[in-house]
Image (cartoon, helix red, strand yellow):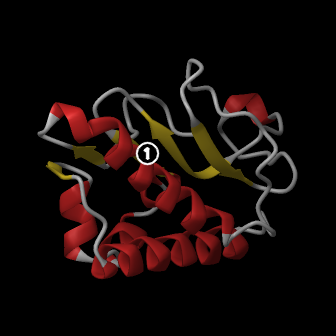
């Protein structure tokens, strides 16, 4: 699992305070539906460490031993997660931190989201970009023998 220092997130903010909760919940639910399309092969029953905030994550089916990490002990490995934070929705995609080549295959629009706070919308293009990124993550994990 990536360390806190290496995890980037998509931050989606709403500017009108009265609409924040409903809009952010809508974005959260849309992202959860995207993640659910990948279970199986990924597990979803492993609780996400989110401090009690609504969250959803995709984990590899079995704990994985990564050479040179965690003392060689098998660990539950996350592929992606979404957390409904106060004021934004965090979207975490772990596969992009394993190989730079994987990150380069993501759409420029999605890569920009990993750095910026944007208006609270998930248009069709962004939904497709997220789904493609999850598909890419699945492919990367399958190539590594984790699925």
Characterize the local packing of mark 1: few (<14), some (14-19) or many (20 or more) Cα atoms within 10 angstroms.
some
Q: Residue 17, image x and y in percent?
A: 18, 31
Q: Residue 13, image x and y in percent?
A: 21, 42
Q: Nearer the viewer, residue 69 or 62?
A: 62
Q: Residue 60, image x and y in percent?
A: 76, 55
Q: Examine the rendered structure and indicate whether residue 64 appears above or below residue 140.
A: above
Q: Quadrant of the N terminus?
A: top right
Q: Nearer the viewer, residue 129 or 111?
A: 129
Q: Examine the rendered structure and indicate whether residue 141 appears above or below residue 60.
A: below
Quarter location, residue 55: top right
Q: Is residue 107 visible?
A: yes
Identity of the residue furthest to the front in this view? 18
Total labels: the figure holds: 1
Q: Residue 107, image x and y in percent?
A: 28, 77
Q: Which residue is at 40% across, 31% downward? A: 85
Quarter location, residue 47: top right
Q: Which residue is at 42% across, 53% downward? A: 26
Find disc 1 in the rendering and name its residue. 25
Left or right: residue 68 versus residue 13 is right
Identity of the residue furthest to the left in this view? 15
Q: Nearer the viewer, residue 111 or 86?
A: 86
Identity of the residue furthest to the right in this view? 62
Left or right: residue 136 versus residue 11 is right
Q: Is residue 9 visible?
A: no
Indicate the secondary structure of the residue bearing disc 1.
Answer: helix
Q: Which residue is at 67% across, 64% downward? A: 36
Q: Quadrant of the C terminus?
A: bottom right
Q: Examine the rendered structure and indicate whether residue 66 appears above or below residue 112.
A: above
Q: Which residue is at 67% across, 72% downward? A: 37
């Amino acid at each position: 699992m990536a360390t806190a220092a290496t995890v980037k997130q998509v931050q989606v903010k709403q500017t009108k305070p009265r609409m924040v909760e409903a809009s952010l919940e809508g974005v959260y639910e849309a992202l959860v539906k995207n993640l659910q399309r990948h279970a199986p092969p990924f597990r979803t029953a492993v609780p996400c460490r989110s401090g009690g905030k609504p969250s959803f994550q995709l984990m590899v089916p079995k704990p994985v031993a990564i050479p040179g990490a965690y003392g060689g002990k098998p660990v539950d490995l996350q592929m992606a997660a979404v957390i409904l934070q106060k004021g934004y929705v965090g979207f975490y995609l772990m596969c992009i931190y394993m190989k730079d080549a994987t990150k380069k295959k993501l759409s420029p629009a999605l890569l920009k989201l990993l750095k910026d706070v944007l208006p609270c919308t998930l248009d069709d293009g962004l939904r497709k970009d997220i789904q493609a990124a999850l598909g890419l993550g699945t492919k990367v994990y399958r190539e590594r023998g984790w699925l």
